[in-house]
Amino acid sequence: MKNSRIIPFIILLTFSILGINLNAQTRSPEPKSGFPLTKKIIQHHLIYPKAALDKKGGKIIVYYDVDKAGNASNYRVENAFDEECAAEAIRLVKMIEWNPAMENGKNVDYHDYYAVDFSPKSYKKAEEKNPRLMLPEQEYPAQKSNKIYVLKDLHQSPQPYFANPQVTMAAYLRTNLQFPEQAKQFEIQGTVTLSFVVETDGRASNIMVENSVGGGCDNEAIRLIQNLVWTPGVKNDSLVRTRMTQDITFRIGERNYYDGNTY
């Protein structure tokens, strides 16, 4: 009889202890795009300082503070191997939007850091293999503020930029979209909706999936947006960061993949 009373008590005590430990854990700030995709975005935006390309690379640690609302500030670098690379690392990390840290289920202020990799060899190899499309020199300077604007507040909205001015967004998607094998196999189709920020350098950051299709379609939509360059939004004669959304539709034909549909 005593044992039957002790066992439930032990189970209850175990769960109570586990609950306390779980609640006591602190979750550090996380990029809204997630760490893996944010790393790719950082690499895609990185412009290696020319003077540093012949030097040894390494990691540059950017320190910052993230408040309870997810706003980051007080960016700083200590003991960097190159001053120009340090400035570029800060520029890149300042693009990241954060989910705030949490402790005991509540948002908290947090001191954090992010490491940016600088590899001259990898950068040169990537540029030789697939040189990135660069915007022509813009008429306006970039706004110093890190504020993100919505389209209705702009004097000029971002537009996709292509080396051939005859190319349209629809043509770009039609030509470059690679229908994922998994989506073909299981006849998955639909519209992926992405939200992202067009930075003043014309590239997308903080890419998030607002409407998922699955089957590899989400990743393919992200790839297409990552490879695009935009003319940045303009506000008061300054280039500004702009929040955008884009629908990318994956549609299969009348016959399925294994019946010979070429998509």
Image (cartoon, rainbow, N blue to C red):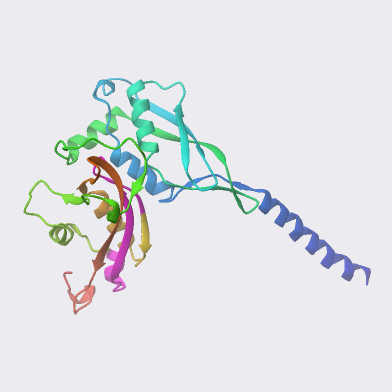
Count of marks placed on residues: 0
The residue that appears at 22% across and 60% down in the rendered structure is: 178
Residue 140 position (above or below residue 257): above
Measured as percent of width and height from the top left, residue 135 is found at: 17, 40
Of 239 and 183, nearer the camera is 239
Q: Quadrant of the N terminus?
A: bottom right
Q: Residue furthest front?
A: 236
Q: Quadrant of the C terminus?
A: bottom left
The residue sitting at the bottom extreme is 254
Q: Which residues are magenta?
A: 181-207
The answer to which quarter of the image holds residue 214 is bottom left
Q: Is residue 96 left or right of residue 262?
A: right
Q: Quadrant of residue 46?
A: top left
Residue closest to the eye, 153 or 174: 153
Residue 252 place in picture, x, y as percent: 22, 73
Is residue 75 visible in the rendered structure shown here? yes
Residue drawn at the location 13% of the way across and 48% of the way down: 162
Asked whether residue 198 appears in the rendered view, the answer is no
Classify 61 as above or below 243: above
Q: Foreground residue, 43 or 188?
A: 43
Quadrant of the rendered structure where residue 130 is?
Answer: top left
Taking the magenta stretch, the answer to whether it contains residue 206 is yes
Relative vertical location of residue 222 with respect to residue 12 in this rendering, above or below: above
- The structure residue drawn at horizontal position 35% and vertical position 34%, both measured from the top left corner, is 91
